[in-house]
Amino acid sequence: MSTGGFLFLVLLIALIVALPIWPFSRRWTIGPTMIIGLLLVLVLVLILIGTI
């Protein structure tokens, strides 16, 4: 697995964990989910254009 694929997988798992459906994350605001989502999109774009 390439570095880009590994980063994508880690960020995808982090995004699922940060969703406010889990009991420990319900008191969080949308901030962590939004930040991880933006990082996920950034890594996906970098993978698609071939930088990573």
Image (cartoon, grey):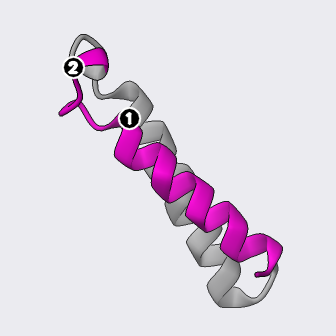
Query: In which quadrant will I find the N terminus?
Result: bottom right
Query: In which quadrant will I find the C terminus?
Result: bottom right
Which residue is under mark 1?
18
Q: Specify the quadrant of the image occupied by residue 23.
A: top left
State which region is magenta.
1-24
Q: Is residue 33 above or below residue 6?
A: above
The residue mark sitting in front, 2 or 1, is 2
Q: Residues within 10 Å of mark 2 (few under 14, many from 20)?
A: few
Identify the residue at horizontal 57%, vertical 73% (top origin).
44
Is residue 32 one of those drawn in magenta? no
Identify the residue at horizontal 58%, vertical 64% (top origin).
9
Cα–Cα span, label 2 and label 1 = 11 Å
For marks 2 and 1 on the same chain, the one whose residue lies earlier in the sequence: 1
Q: Which mark is residue 23?
A: 2
Q: Specify the quadrant of the image occupied by residue 47.
A: bottom right
Type of the residue with mark 2: Pro
Left or right: residue 30 versus residue 32 is left
Q: Is residue 25 above or below residue 32?
A: above
Q: Residues within 10 Å of mark 1 (few under 14, many from 20)?
A: many
How many labels, in total?
Answer: 2
Q: Position of residue 17 (x, y in %)?
A: 39, 39
Q: Residue furthest top?
A: 27
Q: Nearer the viewer, residue 3 or 39?
A: 3
Identify the residue at horizontal 81%, vertical 80% (top origin).
51
Q: Is residue 51 above or below residue 15?
A: below
Q: Nearer the viewer, residue 32 or 16?
A: 16
Identify the residue at horizontal 74%, vertical 73% (top origin).
4
**SS type, badge 2:** helix
Q: Which mark is residue 31?
A: none
Type of the residue with mark 1: Ala
